[in-house]
Amino acid sequence: MIFRVFFACLLLLPFGARAADTITVFAAASLTNAMQDIATLWMAGGHPKVVFSFESSGTLAQQIAHGAPANVFVSADEKWMDDLAKRHALLAASRSDLVGNSLVVVEPKQGLKPVKLGAGSNLLAVLGPDGRLAVGDPAHVPAGIYARQALQKMGLWEVASARLAPADSVRAALRLVELGEAPAGIVYGTDVKVTPSLGIAGIFPPDTHDPIRYPVAVLKAHNTAAARDFVAFLHTQPAQDVFLHWGFTAP
């Protein structure tokens, strides 16, 4: 793996977590590949085992609010992290913005039809007469919330809302397009990298939606030294290089 060169450096990092600890990380589904690679780097340095739960940020935040024993939460938007902050569930000093992302229209590479995203958009035309637009559920999935904001900004929401195929997470929306159940979808730019058969048909201008930031924090009820060390590790250069590899940007 291209990050193997960093393994020796990890052994020198001043993290004090005990190897016997296990860290449970609840993370947005779009972070799956990057976080798994980062955990491999972390554990290769002799640090505690990391166990993940990847889901929609809204689903994870609600599970945490109801007592799920997570040590660390990484959200795909500020809203769900703010919700937990209001519940006094976070170790406030540990919260920080980790990475950023872009919002795109995804289609099968074979027969890909470029989409204009702005005035005079042809987004609905590429769906055909009966096709639906795959999105994360705008009621609670951050990617779906960003999608709704963008469609509203472009004046398409009233029509597009009746053509949606809402999914439980952004990766589930991606899967609908991959399986041919929807001709197009709105996902993160990073999601396209994990599905070679799909391509980007258009990128939403940043001013059509709120900035896409991924905040991270340790959870107060399960605050451990290992959890704090892992969050610190996410900001180190080796970890940030992994995020860059998977297409994430600076927050």
Image (cartoon, helix red, strand yellow):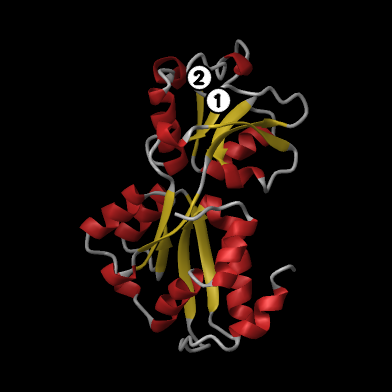
Q: Which badge, 2 or 1, comes first in the chain's sequence?
A: 1
In front: 26, or 16?
A: 16
Kindly tell me whether residue 103 is visible in this rendering.
Answer: yes
Q: Is residue 233 above or below residue 52?
A: below
User: Are the residues tagged 2 and 1 within 8 Å (C-beta)?
Assistant: yes
Secondary structure beneath dot 1 equals: strand
Name the residue: 41% across, 54% down: 60
* Disc 2 from disc 1: Cα separation: 6 Å
Image quadrant holding the C terminus, namely: bottom left
Q: Position of residue 159 (x, y in %)?
A: 44, 14
Q: Position of residue 50 (x, y in %)?
A: 54, 73
Q: For the residue marked with disc 2, what is the amino acid?
A: Arg
In front: 29, or 155?
A: 155
Q: Circle 2 is placed at which residue position?
A: 163
Q: Is residue 70 above or below residue 178?
A: below
Name the residue: 33% across, 55% down: 81
Q: Position of residue 22 (x, y in %)?
A: 49, 79
Secondary structure beneath dot 2 equals: helix
Q: Is residue 26 above or below residue 131?
A: below
Name the residue: 61% across, 63% down: 242
Kindly tell me whether residue 45 is visible in this rendering.
Answer: no
Q: Circle 1 is placed at which residue position?
A: 133
- Callout 2 crowding tier (Cα within 10 Å): few <14, some 14–19, many ≥20: some
Q: For residue 221, which quarter of the picture?
A: bottom left
Q: Position of residue 52 (x, y in %)?
A: 52, 65
Image quadrant holding the N terminus, namely: bottom right
Q: For the residue marked with disc 1, what is the amino acid?
A: Leu
**Could you tell whether 1 is left or right of 214 in the image?**
right
**Could you tell whether 42 is left or right of 195 in the image?**
left
In front: 91, or 121?
A: 121
**Could you tell whether 67 is left or right of 3 in the image?**
left
